[in-house]
Amino acid sequence: MQVGRDLAHRGCRGKDVRWHSRAAGASVEPAKRGRMDVERIGLAVFGAFVGALGWLVVGMFLQRRDAERRARSAARAVWFEIGINAVGIELARDHGVFTALSRSSFDRLLPDLATWLPLDELEVIAGAYQGHAGYEQAWRDTSLPEAVRRALLSRLAEATRDAHDRLAGRAFANDARPTGTAAATDRATTR
C-alpha cells in the first residue's frame, strides 16, 4: 500500500504502473521462451558435465600424487630398517654378535610398496626379509658348522645390501641420495 501512495505522489496513475508477478523473461513470446529454456537447460547440463569431469580429473590426479607420496615415505622407512638390519647382519658375520632384526616397517608398509615398486625390485627387497629365518637359525642353532653359518650370513648380508641399494634408488630418486650406512662405509674402507 505504501508503494501505491509513493507512486501517486510522484504523479503516476494506476494505469501507467504495471505490476508483474512474472519472471524477467516472462514478457517474451511463448515460442521463444521454450527455445530459450532448452538452450539454458542445455548449457546447464554441459556446464555440469564439464565441472564433474574436471572434478574427477583433479581428484584422480591428487589421489595418485598422494599415493605416490605415501609409497615414497614407506620406501624411506623400509630403507632405514634395511640399513639397520644390514649393520646387525654384518656385525653377526664379522664378529659373531647377534642382535634381533626388525621387520615391522616392512610388514606394515608392504601394501604401499607393492603398488608402487616394480615386481623385480619388490622381490629383491622381500628376499632380504625372507633371510631372517636363516639369520635366526645361525643365531640359535649351536650345532650349525661355522663355515655354514658364515656362508649363510654372507649371503644374507649381500641380499640385504642389494635391497638397500635398490630401495635407495627409488625412495630418494628426486632428493639428495644418502651416502649409505656405517656398514657400507666400513665395506668401502676394508676393500
Image (cartoon, helix red, strand yellow):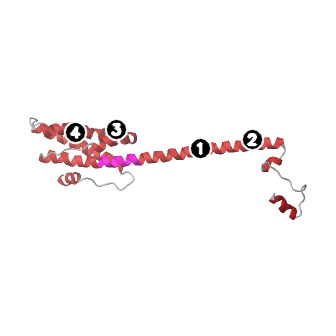
Check disc 1 and give the amino acid type: Ala
How packed mark 1 is, by other alpha carbons closer than 10 Å (few <14, some 14-19, many 20 or more), is few
Q: Which residue is mark 2?
A: 38
What is the x, y in percent for residue 90? Answer: 18, 47
Q: Secondary structure at mark 2?
A: helix
Position of 166 with respect to 182 (left or right) is: right
Q: CA distance from mark 2 to mark 4?
A: 70 Å
Give the main secondary structure of the magenta stretch: helix
- Mark found first going from the N terminus, 1 or 4: 1
Mark found first going from the N terminus, 3 or 4: 3
Q: Which residue is mark 4?
A: 132
What is the crowding at mark 4: few (fewer than 14 residues within 10 Å), some, or many (at least 20)?
Answer: some
Q: Residues within 10 Å of mark 2 (few under 14, many from 20)?
A: few
Badge 4 element: helix
Q: Amino acid at mark 2?
A: Val
Chain part drawn in magenta? 69-79
How many numbered callouts? 4
Residue position for label 3: 120
* Residue 52: numbered disc: 1
